[in-house]
Amino acid sequence: MTTAFDVPAFPLLQRVAEHLRSEGKVSEPDWAPFARTGVHTEKAPVQKDWWFLRTAAVLRKVYVLGPIGTSRLAAEFGGARDGGSAPYHPRKGSRNIVRSALQQLEEAGYVAVREKRGRIVTASGRKLLDRLAYDVLITIAKTNPQMMKYARVK
């Protein structure tokens, strides 16, 4: 069975974001067009569908790193803070964006809270990611036939 570990992250994230948008269980908050993704960024994201891409990335991070809490997830989406002439220092990403994305994924049934341990991916979330990872692998294998050895097809 193909899993999310077997395919490149970005094509998988695009496919998951497309699925989340079309499914309608995840919606962009009213404040999303104006929000920066962290204190390390100067401006808001330019992409129109950045919320769905970030939510897909949060789902994949919980799949790969879970159980994981909101603070550690925010650190995963952080970056270097430009302090002018001062040296760069790492800063966490927006915890509100991560928390809101996790709440929407919980309502959709893809993520669950593990008591005092953080969030984990549910069976339906794992099924979604693995199914879309297989689709991505088949798409990649059309251009690169050697990738079919990872498809694990009978």
Image (tube, grey):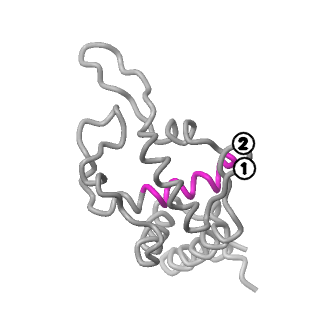
**In the rendering, at what x and y percent does residue 137 appear?**
57, 74
- Numbered tag placed on residue 114 in the rendering: 1
Task: Return the residue at label 2.
Answer: 117
On the image, the x and y values in percent for residue 63 come to 64, 56
Residue visible at 31% across and 53% down in the picture:
32
Q: CA distance from mark 1 to mark 2?
A: 5 Å
Q: Amino acid at mark 2?
A: Arg
Q: Are marks 1 and 2 in contact (CB under 8 Å)?
A: yes
Which quarter of the image is occupied by the N terminus? bottom right
Q: Which residues are magenta?
A: 54-67
Disc sitting over residue 27 in the figure: none
Could you say which is closer to the camera, residue 6 or residue 22?
22
Measured as percent of width and height from the top left, residue 29 is found at: 35, 58
Residue at (69, 64) in percent of width and height? 122
Q: In this rendering, would 60 be left or right of 153?
A: left
Describe residue 152's horizontal placement relative to residue 90 as left or right. Answer: right
Q: Amino acid at mark 1?
A: Arg
Which residue sits at x=61%, y=67%?
109
